[in-house]
Image (spheres, rainbow, N blue to C red):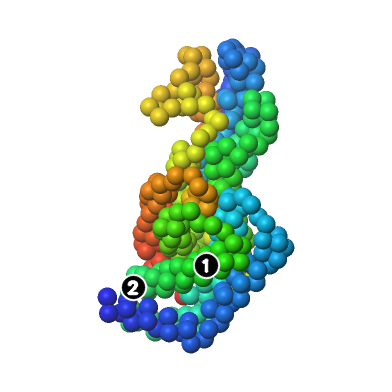
Amino acid sequence: MIKGLVRNIVKDLRIEFRSKVVISLILSFSVIVTISIGFASGGIIGSPMVHAILLWVIIFFSGMNTSHLFYREIEEHTALFNLMYYSPESIFVSKLIVNCIIMVAVAAIVGLLYLFVMDVSVYNVSGFAIMMLAGSSALAVCTTIIAAITALVQARGGLFTILSFPITLPIITVVIKSTTQCFSKEIYSSWSAILFLLAFSTLLGVVSYILFPYIWREF
Amino acid sequence: MVLIIIDALLMLASLYLIYIWVPPAAILGETSRIVYLHVPLAWVSTLAFIVAGLASIQYIRKNAIEYIHCARSSVHIGFFFSILTVITGSLWAKVMWGSYWNWDPRETSITLLLLIYIAYFSLHQIVHTNPKGAMLESVYLVIAFVASPFLIFVVPRLYPSLHPEPVINTQGAILLDTEMRLVLIISVVTFTLFYATVLKLLLKVYKLEYVCTEDVS
């Protein structure tokens, strides 16, 4: 299983980097939105909370470009091949890991770009880094199963965002609160937020892992 | 039919108890009567979403069409009751806290719950004619079912709330007068029975629709 898992992850990442479609989409979306916000506001957004909200909204919508992970299997007719050689669980875990890698990369790029363009001071750098890592991973865990659901329907791009947003809102609410504290001078402990993110994403991850074979059968 | 008659009688009795028999609460006054509607409505919407989640699990396990009909019907009822919960809550909030909407954690969590099921309706609209649709709907409803306890029980406890802790507290005790408690329990039972009646009727409608479609095809 591990061998198949690693092979799938390497294959998916290789396809992503070869095609460059998603990478260029994510990069251009995040750069355009961040610079537009900076341009429109003239770089004078004072409140740490507004910065935290804008940052996570950009990360969320940049991450929405990863909805193709499962759809590609339908488009390229590789679902049957995968079904023969790999277990559905192994496919789900590999897609989940690829989604996590992409989301963490998106959060890192958008985070650095936002701090640079908007000139935001981070008072708790380690807390901010942990929150970016935990928040983006939790978003990836929760949206992987939604990507599988929407791969089988029409209008999947719009539907993916509509279905993902309410499910991931608890995560976004918690990370915005923690990121606000990192941007302000107040003393802050990220443990309760990390615990919440861990519990929420673990539960959804496990349920998604159990449910995925039922969706995979429909591919 | 018997269920409908019993429920109608119970509903009339509950209305009499709520608006005439039970005395108003000491500090809250006449406005406190809304609690006998607000709490049962919130309870029934939670129950309906739980039933929808459980029916979806059963559909995934057994692939029997009646379970997805039960899940769909229950989501519709739960959604309707959630809206009524928000309306009664907002009316009470205006009287007690001076504003219809206060971004209280409980208000926010029920809104998130509504958003989850609004998203479900979008999915339902797109896939209900698709043969794979029932499975996709079920999977999404199970995900919603798993995420909901975080919204109902965890998120409201992470942030300070305007909702009164003494009514239903962390010990799980209901600190109300005997008369008020009795009326609240009767109202909860009545609305639960009302939910069961409507669910039964909707299931019949779905069954008829399904039989007609099968006959045509």
Quadrant showing the N terminus of chain B: top right
Labelled disc at residue A112: 1
| Left or right: A204 as drawn, with respect to A71 | left
The disc numbered 2 marks a residue on which chain?
A: A
Residue A173 can be seen, yes or no? no
Residue A183 can be seen, yes or no? yes
Query: From the viewer's perspective, is residue A69 above or below residue B87?
Result: below
- Element at badge 1? helix
Q: Which residue is mark 2?
A: A90
Query: From the viewer's perspective, is residue A153 above or below residue A54?
Result: below
Can you give x and y, in whole percent of width and height, for residue B108 in the image? 57, 42
The disc numbered 1 marks a residue on which chain?
A: A
Foreground: A120 or A86? Answer: A120
Give the amino acid type for the residue marked by disc 1 in the picture.
Leu
- Element at badge 2? helix
Query: From the viewer's perspective, is residue B91 above or below residue A177?
Result: above
